[in-house]
Image: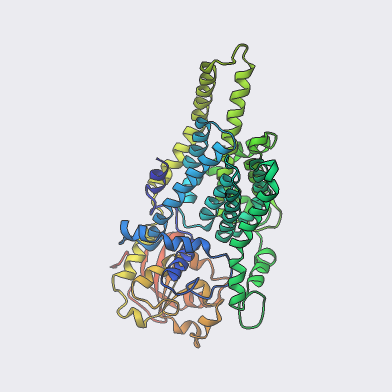
Amino acid sequence: MIIYLRAWNIGRTPFPNDDEGTYLAQAWAVRHGAGLAHYTYWYDHPPLGWIQLSWLSWLPAWLAPDQPTFVQGRIAMLPVAAAGALLVHLVARRVGLGRPAALAAMLLYGLSPLAVTMSRQIYLDNFAVVWALAAFALALSPRRHLWHHVASGAALAAAVLSKETILVVLPALLVALWQGSDPRTRTFSFAGFASGFALTGMFYPLYAILKGELLPGPGHVSLVGSLGFQLGSRAGTGSVFRSGTEAHTLLGDWFATDPLLIAGGAAAALAALAVRRLRPVALAAVILALVAARPGGYLPKMYVIQLLPFLAIALAGMAQTAVRAAVQAVPGSAGRPAIRLTAGVALLATAAALFGPVWYRGDRDTVRTDDTTVYYDAAQWLRDGHIADPARTRVVTDGVLWLDAVDAGFTPGTGVIWHYKLDNDPAIEKTMPHGWRDIDYVVSTPALRGERQNLPTVRDLLAHSTVVATFGEGDGRIDILKVGEVGEVTKGGATE
């Protein structure tokens, strides 16, 4: 049911994010042997996330070969969502939840409108959280084998190599390892964990060393330089507590989508810090929440993906704790399963009454909304041969449509250009000695138009182009622009 809900209407909502197109294009580059990215790889994120996406590319090619590429990428995320739901159940069991409570945790995570929306999108966080949950499951393994703890360290490294921000859960994972290890061999368990983490994680800096790109220097990108940008130079989104900031708006959007899991899970995580078995997942949730709330930091919309599974487990765990406490408070309840069953059913009914209406509205909107028709139409326009000689034509697109243009016959990299690279990649600038005049067409999307204040070439292209086709209307429309000439204006592909 969880995967069916994620798959239902997956290509129609939500509106594509440019990051989705970026990771999908990078996965294409890996799959076709073009390197770790479709342009110069500058170490903005470790590459394991889109490497995994490239491994899953056979699935959409089999199920939906004629769909726009962003839809194919979202289909490839379905196995990742399935693995995440199963691991939520497994971790819940290993922190002491009974089968009903563990199932409740999986449903809290699987049916949340926020999780349904975010996990179907092509985000690195979805890969990272699966590996992080696997690390917790291995650290808490009841068998307490040394290789489980080595594998836990390796799994955390895989999580970090998928999305580096997940590293903040390390203290919580060490608490889980402490609880999951035998006191007599705990030193070996921690040494094994550290070895698994270091040996797996070392491949990333080793790659940079072998490429001569570990340290900053003239004429090349660097791992250390990119870390400096991410940690120090990148513009922040403001405080979540200050009205009008990007972070505050984003937090409001999260609460509007699923107020119950966000608020209830946060309260449960704080309470669960006092419960020994629940402490690892509660601490992970609290740390992730504190990082999101730090003043002046950068808070992306997909960050909540990392938080949701830990909130769900903490909430289900505290519900189980409350039921057990209530049962024990009833005189003569010892050994009477009927009382526990009655308390569990009452709690389930209460949860259904609280969560049901909110989640029904949110999930209903997800499976009914159509936000992406303009991208379907623009992708089809590119593939329908409206541009006579794509191999000799230069077109600028956003990240989402870049791969559709490649499929339509445009030359990757220099023939179809991701708009962000126009003023940020010297290799592209060298191929444009006349600036905007070297471009033939622009696919003007909301993401592209949103960068015209930051990218002078984008601004010049929009100022010297004529609309030849348009799809949709208002700020969400997509225009096909011919650069430097007056063209025949069409709407929806039909001549007006």
Left or right: where does residue 467 sit relative to residue 135? left
Residue 81: image location, x then y, percent: 46, 49
| Quarter occupied by the C terminus | bottom left
Seen at 68% across and 45% down, the residue is 185
Q: Which of 366 and 208 is in front in this view?
A: 208
Q: Exactly how many numbered labels are in the figure?
A: 0
Q: Is residue 246 visible?
A: no
Seen at 52% across and 42% down, the residue is 88
Residue 76 vertical position relative to residue 265 in the rendered view, above or below = below
Residue 330 location, quadrant: top right
Q: Which residue lies furthest to the bottom in this view?
A: 433
Residue 136: image location, x then y, percent: 59, 46
Residue 228: image location, x then y, percent: 68, 68
Seen at 63% across and 12% down, the residue is 331
Left or right: where does residue 271 sit relative to residue 448? right
| Quarter occupied by the N terminus | top left
Q: Residue furthest front?
A: 184
Q: Which of 287 and 366 is in front in this view?
A: 287
Residue 316 vertical position relative to residue 421 in the rendered view, above or below = above
Seen at 37% across and 68% down, the residue is 404
Q: Which of 405 and 488 is in front in this view?
A: 405
Left or right: where does residue 306 sit relative to residue 38? right
Residue 215: image location, x then y, percent: 67, 75
Residue 481 location, quadrant: bottom left
Q: Is residue 450 visible?
A: yes
Task: Report the coloring of the rendering.
Answer: rainbow
